[in-house]
Image (tube, rainbow, N blue to C red):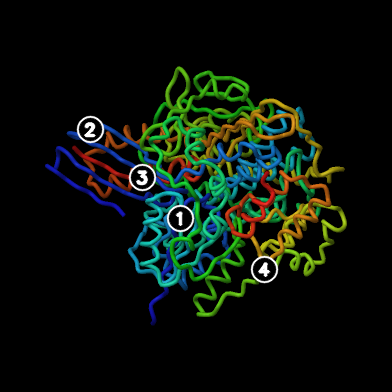
Amino acid sequence: MPRKPRLAVFKFASCDGCQLSLLDCEDELLALAGELEISHFLEASSAVQDGPYDLSLVEGSITTPHDAARIREVRRQSRALVTIGACATAGGIQALRNFRDVREFTRIVYARPDYIETLERSTAIADHVPVDFELRGCPINKAQLLEVLVSFLRRKRPNIPSHSVCVECKRRGIVCLMVARGTACLGPVTHAGCGALCPSFHRGCYGCFGPAESVNTPALAERLEQLGVDRGHRLRLFRSFNANAPEFREESERHEQ
Amino acid sequence: MSSSESSEPGKSKTIKVDYLARVEGEGSLYLKIRDGAVEDAKLKIFEPPRFFEAFLRGRDFREAPDITARICGICPVAYLMSACHAMESVCGVRVDGQLRALRRLLYCGEWIESHGLHVFMLHAPDFYGFDDAVAMAKAHPELVQRGLRLKKLGNAIMTALGGREVHPINIKLGGFYRAPRRRELDALRGELEWAREFTAVALARLKELEFPDFERDYEFMGLRHPSEYPLNEGRLVSSAGVDEPISRYDCVLREVHVAHSTSLQSRRVGGGPVHMGPMARYALNHDKLPPEVQQLARDAGLGARCQNPFQSVLVRMVEIAYAVHEAARIIAEYAEPDAPAIAVEPRAGTGYGATEAPRGVCYQRYTIDDAGVITDCKIVAPTSVNQAVIEEDLRVFAGARAELPDEQLRWQCEQAIRNYDPCISCSCHFLKLDVERV
């Protein structure tokens, strides 16, 4: 019998929610553990084995000198490396520091800033090491995570569409919130994957999957302005959970005073 | 990743676990043992700082719930709810009736999921002697499979109300973007009925576990509400007599910044470390549990308070039973509200929110201006409060067992930490065990 592929899960600066998505696959988890050897997954197991690993899932962004060194070691130990979630693919919400002075941030939160070691910017994993596939979302969609794992086992490219949330709305037959109700919505520029979740709850998309492929953010911003969304609000819409994704970062900077 | 070093066996020693497993986030523990006595016990937290309190300044008050939810993927509802209550208190808005009931239902979902994860996947393997739930599933398939089914029910409740289990999208100041339809909630009733039976079966199994003989006289702290077991609201009370509105939280608990942690620790002003979470809630609010849940607790051998942290696994199961009971009640009484939310207009001031996260009180304080811009905020996660009490537990627990072989001592100390289901991502964000015998 061939040996089972070895899976590892690593965490950097993050909320744990994306790796939890693996444990949230309640119906599939035990079957999956039959196909893969879970070699390193601290949140779930005390049994920790050294690399190399066939597939490493990486959650979280790089924010400390120690983590910048650690991700290089993880890369060396991993045959394939897949980043999961907005922190790992775009720096996450903690990348809001990239627009401000991090020393000032440390003083606001910590009584003894001298105890804290941190980098000035929160950056994506791909800014540090080559990445084989990026799975988007804040958090990721667990069906997409399963698709990535199963594709890896079958040695095929995962079927993860890179079109916008608008396409998902059309597919689900959801009436356009922006057209019908004038609701501010980032659907036209946001990467699919959630299944148009917010619009299905009558809420405008807030961009938690980050930018879709080849998007026209200025056109959307202009439309938002026509809808009466003020400058500050436009800036904040583009500057949240994927603030450091280049397309969103550049658009938010256009709305700075 | 553990290591032990002995210089002069019997006199001085170091045991290290650099990354503690089956906890959420990254941390380690350091124990210094000299001549068989614990000299120092530190729970080190080295999650990278993420600066939420800093970057929330300048953001719009309506953004606080979704942003703070990202502090923790295990208990996003706690952050969503505490942020909503804090902002609503600034703006003079009170959410009542069915919308309030729906918020409780959402919280029941998070308790079932988070407690279910801890009981069956993180804590139970310690008692049964396995590295993880997957290994345990080979020996006890029915217990693990049904534990997963229970956890899935918690997620199903959160998904029905919030759209997804991690970082729900349907929660806003004043209520929801869309209220669930009757039939969407009715779809949960069958599983809730199953869960009611399973929680009794699970408790009967778990009470047979072997618990270390270890009790401490904790100061328990949590919320207390006049008519219900606390989830979203209540006064801040403690077993040592604290009884204050949550707006006085900062006068009751003070944060200190220690060098070994990127999480700030809390102490009670004029007192010591306090214990928050399931054991505290249970001791402070036993009388508010419905008679059938009290009976379940009695059948599991629990009195009106439990002081053995290893038995927190039983108390968590009792709380799951409560959440199942409460969820079923809310759904049975549900009537679709006229509007999914009430309007919340900004007004300058400071507001407070404290709700019962699975691990204890999640506290948030915000100051906003007339335009709704956040000018100041403070967020305290329950694990950062429990950090000091965990260190005390370790000192006492390891002190009485300092002569145990290293491997056994390390395993039991890790278990003593997992008793608290510490969420280091929350507190700042994990653990690490490091025993030094000098």
Determine the secondary structure under disc 2.
strand
Q: What is the number of the mark on residue B37? A: 2
Residue at left offset 80%, top offset 44%: B334
How far apart marks 3 and 4 lie (CA) works out to 44 Å
Which amino acid, by three-letter code, is at mark 1?
A: Lys
Which amino acid, by three-letter code, is at mark 4?
A: Ser
- Looking at the picture, tell me which residue is in the foreground, A17 or A108: A108
The percent coordinates of residue B104 (x first, y second) are 69, 40
What residue did someone put label 3 on?
A: B28
Residue at left offset 58%, top offset 39%: B357
What residue did someone put label 1 on?
A: A11
The percent coordinates of residue A133 (x first, y second) are 52, 69
Mark 1 or mark 4: which comes first in sequence? 1
| B81 over A53 or under it: above or below | above
Mark 3 or mark 2: which comes first in sequence? 3
Res B186 seen here: no
How far apart marks 1 and 2 lie (CA) works out to 35 Å
Q: Quadrant of residue A223?
A: bottom right
How far apart marks 2 and 4 lie (CA) works out to 64 Å
The percent coordinates of residue B215 (x first, y second) are 39, 32
Horizontal side of residue A164 vs B431, given as left or right? right
Which amino acid, by three-letter code, is at mark 2?
A: Ala
Using a 10 Å C-alpha cutoff, classify the residue at mark 2 as few (fewer than 14 neighbours), some (14 to 19) or many (20 or more). many
